[in-house]
Amino acid sequence: MTGSQPPQWDQSFREVGLVALQAAVLTRRIFLPEAGPDRLSPEQWQLLLALALIDTAPSPYAHPTASVESLAIQLSLDREYAHELLFAMMSDGLVVADDEDAEDPLRLRLSSRGWDAARAYIERAGRFLPGWPPERWPRARDD
């Protein structure tokens, strides 16, 4: 690089930069907190969506649940911070403890209110994805 001339980047190097930029912008747009009484942090929305995806996993997972530890690892969150976020979500009625077994660690799942929020958020996120929803997009079931 000389003077005011920018460096010459290889096309593949530029493509990595473009993909990284697009991912950052898309993430910011999708997880940007919405206004309203149910205003969650981006990390809480990620926890909500992770719980929804875990609970809707196809077989062989009969009744999957998630622990604070597993969610913290999956989302690269500090364990204590994830615990605080999930406790707040429990207090707000979005997440409940799965009490089928008195297990340690505590297992979590979405409440009915949490499912409504997850569905609304996935539909909102889909508006930022080109071609969404597909014509033959199966709607989520309310079993």
Image (cartoon, grey):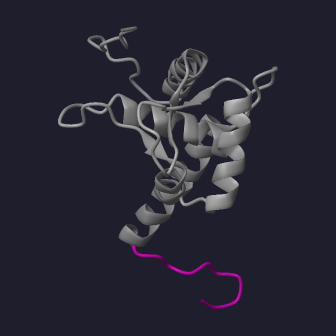
State whether residue 107 is above or below residue 125.
below
Residue at image coords 57%, 29%: 96
Q: Which of 77 and 126 is in front in this view?
A: 77
**x, y percent for residue 6:** 61, 78
- In the rendered image, residue 70 lying in the magenta stretch gets the answer no
Q: In this rendering, does residue 66 appear at all?
A: yes
- In the rendered image, residue 2 lying in the magenta stretch gets the answer yes
Q: Quadrant of residue 79?
A: bottom right
The magenta segment is: 1-10
**x, y percent for residue 94:** 63, 25
Residue at image coords 59%, 89%: 1
Residue at image coords 19%, 32%: 59
Q: Which of 117 and 8 is in front in this view?
A: 117
**x, y percent for residue 135:** 30, 11
Residue at image coords 70%, 89%: 3
Q: In this rendering, does residue 42 appear at all?
A: no
Horizontally, residue 52 falls left or right of residue 42, namely left
State whether residue 14 is above or below residue 115.
below
Horizontally, residue 56 falls left or right of residue 69, namely left
State whether residue 10 is above or below residue 93.
below
Horizontally, residue 44 falls left or right of residue 67, namely right
Q: Which of 13 and 4 is in front in this view?
A: 13
Q: Residue farthest to the bottom?
A: 2
**x, y percent for residue 133:** 39, 17
Q: Residue farthest to the top?
A: 142
